[in-house]
Image (cartoon, rainbow, N blue to C red):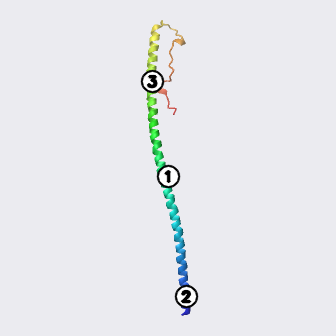
Amino acid sequence: MTQQGAALQNYNNELVKCIEELCQKREELCRQIQQEEDEKQRLQSEVRQLTEKLARVNENLARKIASRNEFDRTIAETEAAYLKAWHRLGRSRAGLCEPSDERDSDSRLVSPFPDPGKLTDSA
């Protein structure tokens, strides 16, 4: 019986040792889980902050694009009105001059603006 008792004691010791190892592995796993939960919270907070910042940037960008479009429209209208007046002035100046086959290069009116149809967006 003593041999059976010793074997039983060995099995008991091995079982206790296995349980202790499992408890240690569980504690390590709990520590890793907590670290990842903390990281998850940090990342979610960062995502919220970046989402709010992105929304602000998008709003500012939309306002600036609308302003730029308004500038483009105003510039185009102003140039068109100026060119119309410039051409009228050229016609009335041509009507005041005596007709001549050879015109001075100084008598021709040249627009200070490029052709409005050929403008490119430099922004």
Numbered label attached to residue 14: none
Badge 2, how many Cα within 10 Å: few under 14, some, many 20+?
Answer: few
The residue located at (47%, 45%) in the rendering is 54
If you read the primary sequence from the N terminus, does the residue marked by circle 3 or circle 1 appear first? 1
Label 2 SS: helix
If you read the primary sequence from the N terminus, does the residue marked by circle 2 or circle 1 appear first? 2
Query: Label 2, label 3: how many angstroms apart (C-alpha)?
Result: 104 Å
Name the foreground residue: 94 vs 33.
33
Q: Quadrant of the N terminus?
A: bottom right
Q: Which residue is mark 2?
A: 7
The residue located at (50%, 56%) in the rendering is 42
Instruction: Look at label 3 and name its amino acid.
Output: Thr
Q: Position of residue 95 (x, y in %)?
A: 45, 9
Q: Which residue is mark 1?
A: 46
Badge 1, how many Cα within 10 Å: few under 14, some, many 20+?
Answer: few
Name the foreground residue: 17 vs 111.
17
Numbered label attached to residue 78: 3
Badge 3, how many Cα within 10 Å: few under 14, some, many 20+?
Answer: few
